[in-house]
Image: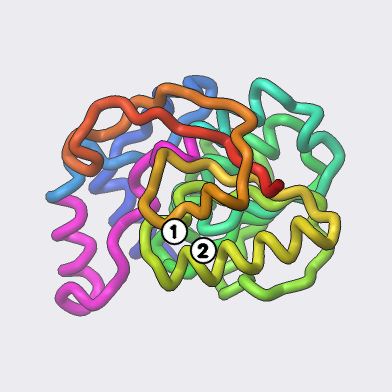
Amino acid sequence: MNDYAAFIQANTRLSRVPLVSCIKLYLAEEGTDLWRKTEDEMERGLGPPPFWAFAWAGGQALARYICDHPKLVRGKRVLDLAAGSGLVAIAAARAGARAVEANDLDCFAGVAIALNAIENAVIIKTRLCDLVGSDEPWDLILAGDVSYQPDMAARITNWLEDRARSGTQVLIGDPGRAYLPREKLRSLASYDVPVPLALEDATMKRTDIWSFL
């Protein structure tokens, strides 16, 4: 963990999130350089990309929506799925959630979430495992930017839809990724989200908060 923390702190800068300036995260300034360094650190490119080092549009929109509607999470048990930096989990904790879990598969993300939680003075439980398919009793599941790869998007969407049908509240933040199942969703809100040009080929992405029909 100390090695991961040192790498994160050496290659990112503690920065305020553009759409949610009350939250600070360890974020990369130059995406391509950090991408290469992370690959070098994790067995010459065999590790996952550093998704944890960026405030992606879907996560920013979800965090903003939570800040605008704190009653949504207050007193609830919340899961931030594919949490990355932990931005959405931090927003939920700040808004008064009873318990917040941030889930990811990347060990770097787990340490980044812990560091970011400390900087924002919140308590978050990190889960480094595959929770898709779980029937644990969360009140609310939040998922930002999970529809950019076909197989992953289909698997996650099917599970989230099942959870929504069983009574769990599910919200998805998405800026128009290719594999978002729009026919199953309705938009609750839209935001213009500042994003890194190097990653998105744009400086602003129109991003929606979606719920299942």
Asked whether residue 66 is in view, the answer is: yes
Q: Return the x and y of residue 30 as percentages of the image width and height.
A: 17, 40
Q: Residue furthest front?
A: 183
Q: Residue at x 31, y 57 (%)?
A: 50
Q: Nearer the viewer, mark 1 or mark 2?
A: 2
**Callout 2: few (<14), some (14-19), or many (20+) C-alpha neighbours within 10 Å?**
many
Q: Are marks 1 and 2 in contact (CB under 8 Å)?
A: yes
Rendered image quadrant of residue 207: top left
User: Which numbered disc covers residue 109?
Assistant: 1
Residue stretch in magenta? 33-60
Q: Return the x and y of residue 146 as percentages of the image width and height.
A: 47, 56
Tell me which amino acid carries mark 1.
Ala
Q: Residue at x 80, y 54 (%)?
A: 168
The quadrant the N terminus occupies is: bottom left
**Callout 1: few (<14), some (14-19), or many (20+) C-alpha neighbours within 10 Å?**
many
Tell me which amino acid carries mark 2.
Asp
